[in-house]
Amino acid sequence: MFESLSEKFDRAFKVLKGQGRISEINVAETLKEVRKALLDADVSFKIAKQFTETVKEKALGQNVLTAISPSQLMVKIVHDELAVLMGGEKAEINLKGSPAIILMSGLQGSGKTTFSAKLANYLKTKKGRNVLLVACDVYRPAAIEQLKVLGEQIGVEVFSEIDSKEPVKIAKKAITYAREKGIATVIIDTAGRLAIDQEMMNEIAAIKKEVNPQETLFVVDAMTGQDAVNTAKAFNDILNFDGVILTKLDGDTRGGAALTIRSVVEKPIKFVGIGEKMDALDIFYPERMADRILGMGDIVSLVERAQEQFDEEAAKKLQKKIQQDTFNFDDFLSQIKQIKKMGNMKDLVGMIPGMGKMLKDVEIEDDAFKSIEAIITSMTPKERSNPSLLNGSRRKRIASGSGTDIQEVNRLIKQFDETRKMMKMMSGGKGSKLMQSMSNMKRR
């Protein structure tokens, strides 16, 4: 995400490289590029101007320490101001109430229904809460059916009344049902339109008045740029919502909405959608997003995702296998599956400091491990558990069965042997660098 903006910021900071001090002249030149980068990212002129003036004021008021360069100081100042622009700190979701009621709002096509299911899945798997999804889009039968399909996919009940055209009554009945069943959280998916209209606004305002939700969330497509900000303002004027959800942030977005929506509506961004899968949801951390925009990666989020997938008990067993030199292709396949659960490969690589910039022109497919998995699953159980059996004839059979060639099979086995040796050498240190080793084994 934000590849174009990151590249332009990097170009702006190069103006200060080699400079011994910060002066009004070189700061002005740098900030001219920063302002241009913001405008190209669809940030409004007013906010871009305010931002660069604040950065200029702070930059000229600081002395450059001998330990850092002017460009490094400018990066820090811009980073801090970006974080402030996006809200400063993460905003928690309010789950008080019995049940806690969350009302979803937004235009049709913003990803509101999908996000409702993602949020239900997040609250169920990460917070241990039972959730009821409520289908209040009475105008589109497809929306009700979509919510039911998603609810079944994540194991969450969906409340709907197909014959009713009164969303307020449906919402009230759903809340009564949730209380009777002891359900902790109710998420109400409302109708959207292709454009803002008074009828839609009146309807969702009526639902909010009747159900008195703990959270009213506005879902907006980040790819719509400055239009997302304008739409958010119109909804906030009517609903006074509690937070913003940015969807499709993994798409070809210029980033303006993420940067400025907070300062326009004065409401925090609480979550971002980063893909189609039900677990493709992230809490919004302004500082971490500023890190990523400036090409610093987001190692904290990467570690958190890893911790979610790699449990301590499994790690101990794996460590023991490495020490005993019994790590095999079954173990390797298991680790690949866990890495894939962490998210799409391009997003993961972008979290590693410096990697996003290095690989900006490299296409990283979600199925980067596809050929490796095909090769391993074409082995017999005995071959997977005992790689030393893999002689020439077996390798030919595996290549044929996996749809690859003998060179790919040989390369994988060689890299596997090298990685296993390296992991054994490292197993006595402070933990294995397994993920890094396996990432190096992707098809080249």
Image: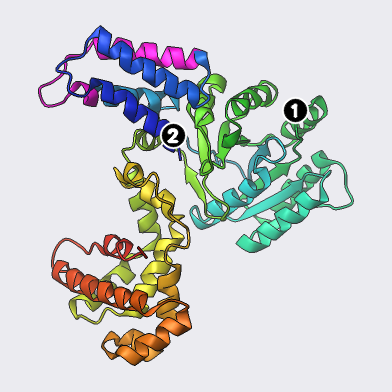
Residue type pointed to by label 1: Ile
Where in the figure is residue 275, as x and y percent of width and height?
54, 50
The C terminus - image quarter:
bottom left
Name the mark on residue 413: none
Q: Residue at x 77, y 56 (%)?
A: 145
Residue 410 inside the magenta-drawn segment? no
Q: Is residue 64 above or below residue 397?
A: above
Is 44 placed left or right of 381 in the picture? right
- Which of discs 2 and 1 lies nearer the camera? The answer is 2
Q: Which residues are magenta?
A: 46-72
Where in the figure is residue 213, as x and y percent of width and height?
66, 36
Tell me, yes or no, if residue 144 can be seen here: yes
Q: Is residue 21 above or below residue 209?
A: above
Name the mark on residue 4: 2
Q: Residue at x 29, y 68 (%)?
A: 315
Q: Quadrant of residue 165?
A: top right
Residue 56 inside the magenta-drawn segment? yes
Tell me, yes or no, if residue 378 can be seen here: no
Check disc 1 and report the residue beneath it. Answer: 196
Is 351 placed left or right of 324 in the picture? right
